[in-house]
Image (cartoon, rainbow, N blue to C red):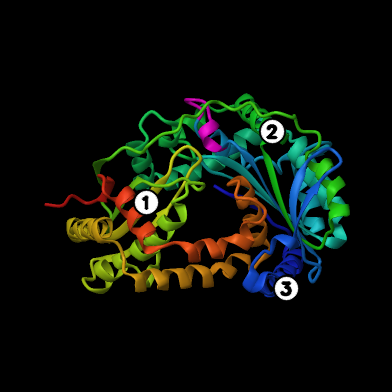
Amino acid sequence: MNVVITARRVTVNLMQAALLGLSLVGVAAFGAQQAEAAKIQRVVSPGGIEAWLQEEHTVPLITVSFGFKGGNSQEPQGKEGVANLLTALFDEGAGDMEGQAFQSAEEDLSMQLSFSQDRDGFYGEFKALTENRDASFNLLALAVSKPHFADEAVGRMKADVGAQLRRESQSPDAIAGNAWVKLAFPGHPYGRPGDGTEATLKQLARADVLDYYKRIFARDGLHVGVVGDIDAATLAPLLDKVFGSLPEKQSLLPVADVTPKSGTVSITYQTPQTIIRFGTPGPKRTDPDFMATYLMNYILGGGEFASWLYKEVREKRGLAYSVDTAVAPHKHAGLWVGGVGTRGEKANESLDIIRQQIKRMAETGPTQAELDAAKAYVIGSYGLRFDTSDKIASQLLAVQIDNLGIDYFDRRNAEVQAVTLDQVKAAASKYLSGELAIVIVGPPVN
């Protein structure tokens, strides 16, 4: 769940204009070289807080993406959903400002602030116009370091989150997703519903929110990416203003490395479209065969209209409305996953074709021509990850979190180009030769 606080219509238009301007210069700024390491500055504040900065002074806008290690895998047993609930509470009063006053100040400043969480991290994104920079960073500092989490606000946000969870409980996609992680990761934090459940949400109180916040919001688990109309000398003290008063050390619960299990689960649900989720173990992000697996996945199911699965399942046979796959690494587990949506009576046939194509890839691999085409797309489309301030800041943050090094943007395309056909075939054999974890949600099939 992602909560976004936006401003009044007139001020939103100002922010949107700035965002549009940066989206037009973003590709030019990164161009064929993407984010050249020489253009990315490692900024260290007087208090020792590090950020990666990409200056872009064409548009009077500053975007900050930041993240803390942790995520919903850090929720205690029985407290699932506390991270999700926390995402909704940062604008509900902070410092000497009650919730309404805080939100009014955001609107007056044309400031945007959002929070989100996943299995391994808790994230924030902040946008401010240059003319309101100092006041906006002051407000961000209050939200990050002095949130209220008042009982009344916790109760109100629990009601809002509960309504969202009730809607999700009726979604075949959400049902399939929750069932798949439960099948693949039994007894592990990754096997729990990422947003919690209505039952666990009811058990949460302010003390649970505050405990999670205090354990996660600390400087040693922090990464920051900044893009826009600001220089290093100006940014450095602002980093201390926002994050400097946080505790030095996180207090994380131990999470074991885990290999996903296989098996099949069928859930009867009356819906026009049967949803199938499948997956196997895959590489972690820093594994040496990650890039080979990434290219293999593009050919098999990640390349949309160009992939084997799209051609065999949809184009040739018309069995499915959609089919795709992805390499999905977590901190404590590598994954290769996929999904298909199809008519109920075609579910078994669709799954049979998917299995056949996975087996084909594991046993024979792609051709050199297919690998060359995959490389051309993966390299050529990389610039699309840098065409807005949001995307650029997110990339700066992600590369830090994955510990890939500040020169990764220079190295990345060469690393793609260097992957050999033998490496792709080896990755396919390694990750696709085992049994799948499969979840089917839809009407019964005879």
Residue 382 tag number: none
SS category of the residue bearing label 3: helix
Question: How many numbered discs, if any?
Answer: 3
Q: Residues within 10 Å of mark 1 (few under 14, many from 20)?
A: many
Check disc 2 and give the amino acid type: Phe
Image point 60% across, 60% down: which residue?
411
The answer for how far apart the CA atoms under marks 3 and 2 are is 36 Å
Viewer can see residue 343:
no
Give the magenta part as a residue range. Answer: 71-79
**Residue at 44% over, 43% down:** 166
Mark 3 or 2, nearer chain start:
3
Q: Residue beneath label 2, please?
A: 149
Percent across and percent down for residue 60 are 81, 66
Considering only vertical position in the picture, is 360 above or below 333?
Answer: below
Which percent across, then down, holds residue 287? Answer: 47, 46
Query: Residue 248, how many percent across, how many down?
Result: 74, 30
| Amino acid beneath label 3 | Gly
Q: Residue at x 37, y 35 (%)?
A: 185
Q: Which residue is mark 3?
A: 21
Give the quadrant of residue 342: bottom left
Discs 3/2, front:
3
- The residue that disc 1 covers is 337
Q: Amino acid at mark 1?
A: Val
Say whether marks 1 and 3 touch (CB < 8 Å): no
Q: Marks 1/2: CA distance?
A: 37 Å
Q: Is residue 9 magenta?
A: no
Q: Residues within 10 Å of mark 2 (few under 14, many from 20)?
A: many
